[in-house]
Amino acid sequence: MNKYTRILVLVATCLVVAYFSSLVTQESVNTWYKTIEKPSFNPPNWIFAPVWSTLYVMMGIAAGLVWHQINSPKREEVKRAMLFFAIQLGLNALWSYLFFGLKNPLLALIEIILLWLMIYETYHKFSKINKFSGYLFIPYLLWVSFATVLNASIWWLNR
């Protein structure tokens, strides 16, 4: 499989995860989320879809570039990095279910901290294999840092 096919497969995978996460999210955004107290720095709802879509595409490109190195001498590093990628992608989807599906900001807060750690570890592992892949993970890491503060604030305001 060539590099571009690998990238396409992983971008598509990330977008499928995004789609299923959005199903849980959409239902609550128009009902429960409207009713809870949010901090003054809460972005408008319309900003989340384009930001997350961009981040999922960047994640897929980063992972595709790393996966492309699977037949290199770094094979074991690539396999480990892709495992962390899969874990963080699963945790990313789980956060939507915990926060919007279960309407549980505290449980989502605990989980997003674990998610942040997995994203950081994925970034670290990707950077060793392909520097550009690491760079592609920086906006994601920054956005989830912001999301963690936002999640904590929402939990605090609504406890």
Image (cartoon, helix red, strand yellow):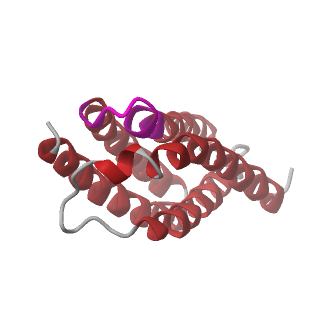
Q: Residue at x 59, y 58 (%)?
A: 62
Q: Residue at x 37, y 40 (%)?
A: 115
Vertical side of 49 occupied by 94: above or below: above
Vertical side of 22 occupied by 5: above or below: below
Secondary structure mostly seen in the magenta stretch? helix
Name the side, left or right, on which 61 lies relative to 44.
right
Query: Which of these two is toward me, 131 or 31?
Result: 31
Q: Which residues are magenta?
A: 95-106
Percent x, y of residue 107: 29, 29
| Quarter of the image with the C terminus in it | top left
Query: Which of these two is toward me, 48 or 134?
Result: 48
Vertical side of 97 occupied by 116: above or below: below
The answer to if 54 sits in the magenta stretch is: no
Percent x, y of residue 51: 49, 67
**Given the current orientation, which residue lies at the most extreme right position?**
1
Picture quadrant of residue 142 = bottom left
The answer to if 99 sits in the magenta stretch is: yes
Q: Residue at x 44, y 46 (%)?
A: 31
Percent x, y of residue 6: 77, 52
Percent x, y of residue 12: 74, 52
Name the side, left or right, on which 71 lies relative to 94.
right
Q: Residue at x 36, y 53 (%)?
A: 34
